[in-house]
Each structure stands twice: as C-alpha cells, then as structure tokens.
Amino acid sequence: YFRNTPFGSGYAVFAGLDPVLDYLEGLRFGDEEIHYLGGLGLFDEPFFSYLRSFRFSGRVIAPAEGEVVFAHEPLLTVEGPLAEVQLVETALLNLINFQTLIATKAARIVGEAGPATVMEFGARRAQGPDGARGASRAACIGGARTTSHLEAGRAFGIPVAGTQAHSWVMAFPTELEAFRAYAEAFPDQCVLLVDTYDTLRSGVPNAIIMARELRRRGHRLQAIRLDSGDLAHLSKEARRLLDEAGCQEVRIMASNELDEHVIESVRKEGGRIDVYGVGT
C-alpha cells in the first residue's frame, strides 16, 4: 500500500501486476548468482541449496491493472512462507511502485487532454532501461559508498551492505531473541535495528547486551540503526548509552525518509549519526 497519493491527486492507477507475476514465475538462482553470493562470505551452503531449488509457491492478491486505487488500500497482498515473501519483497515493491506512479501520471495527463489523444513519448526521459539497477549505480557515482541492491553489486562491483528489517524482529518472540539470531547468522556484519518497540528503553539496551556477547565470542557489533522518531535526539541518547556501556566502537546508522534537508537538520541539532541509509 502507499500512504500518500502522488502528484497531489486523490487517487492512483494500479499497474505492474503482469511484470510481478512474470518475475515470480521465472525467479531462479543460477550458478553465476550463487557464485557471487558465495564470494561475499555471508552465507553458507544450506542457504545456497535452498536458492538452487527455489520456486515461488505463494499466492498474490491484487486489483486489475488500470484500476483506480487509494492510499492505505492494499495494492498487492503476497501470502506464502516467510522466507519466500521476504526474498521477493523488494523486487515486487520496485515493479509495482514505479509502474503505478507512471500510470497515475499518464491518467492525469489524459484527463486534462479532454477529447484529444495522448501519445506516450517518455523513453528519453525515463530512469534508464534497467530502472533500479541503474539508480543504484548512479547513486554510487554521486558519492554513495555501498548499495543494498545485490544485483547492482554483482553487475557493477559496488560494495554491498544492509541491515535487518522490522519484520525480522517481529518474527521472534522477543526483540533480544531476534537480535541473537541475527548476530548468529551475521557475527561480523551485525547491524541491529533498535526502534521496533522502544528505541531507548528496549532496542539500545538489548543491542548493548549483544555487543558484549559478540565481543566475548571474538566479534564486534558494527552498528545500531534508527529508523523513526527524532533522529537527532535519539542518536545523542543512544550514543550516551553506548559509550556509558563501554561500546564506543558501535556506530549509529539512521534511515527513514532522509534527504539533504533532513540530514542538514539532524547535524545542526547535534545528532550523532555515523552512517545515513538513504532510500527515498
């Protein structure tokens, strides 16, 4: 679903379902992709075996393409095993979001054209034939250091980096159990998302516990991530808690609708952010 209707309109026009279904039907992981993932040193053989035999088995519920849709209305519902639906989530959002945006813009143009015919001549203005992959590359040309888009990393040799999701934290009985499971899977690339429940009273204290546990095992907690709230205030308080606990080496990452104006404001307010994850 989307929260705000684009272009100041009261509706959007749904598009992208056929590409989604084609993607899900044809999604496979071959030797080249698995070889690339193996070279990252993040995953083990059971996961590669899972990918080699991967076939999407879930169910997709959606309106018809061209149907008018509204904010907070489910556009695409995907049901299936958690591992499957999380694996395809980013690709489906990419396909639906962009095509729905373009379809909505076209509908607004056609509506204003009245009885006249509208011809689509948009290719020379589009975001490149490969969409998200090209955007990841361009962001790094502009100064971004890493990408969370593995295909862009594979295709262009861009360093890849990422963190856990709120859905990961919520899939476990407690936040601390979610952190422990993530740290077990990624002991040397562990970045913990601390705002799922209560950033300062739960997330950061549990991250401190994990920092100490990782240290005893010969590893290091790389960072915590703040994804909501007053980023300047929360980062200052998180830095204080981390430093008081002897975790000065743990960095603080921020995300959530960041742009140059938000980042400027956080810095002017004395925020203690080490890494910005910009996605919008």
Image (cartoon, rainbow, N blue to C red):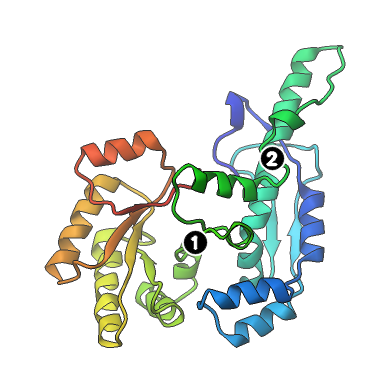
- Residue located farthest toward the left when viewing the structure as drawn: 244
- Give the camera-side residue of 276 and 233: 276
- Give the camera-side residue of 76 and 145: 145
Determine the secondary structure under disc 1. loop
User: Which residue is label 2 attached to?
Assistant: 128
Q: Amino acid at mark 2?
A: Gly
- Could you tell me if residue 13 is visible in this image? yes
Q: Are marks 1 and 2 in contact (CB under 8 Å)?
A: no
Position of 26 with respect to 32 (left or right) is right
Q: Residue at x 47, y 56 (%)?
A: 146
Q: Amino acid at mark 1?
A: Pro
Q: Residue at x 79, y 13 (%)?
A: 113
Position of 193 with respect to 92 (left or right) is left
Determine the secondary structure under disc 2. loop
- The local crowd at label 1, few if under 14, some if 14 to 19, many if 20 or more residues have their Cα within 10 Å, is some
Residue 120, position in %: x, y? 81, 26
Residue 163, position in %: x, y? 44, 64
Position of 51 with respect to 160 (left or right) is right
Q: Residue at x 38, y 75 (%)?
A: 179
Residue 89, position in %: x, y? 63, 59
Tell me the number on the disc at residue 159: 1
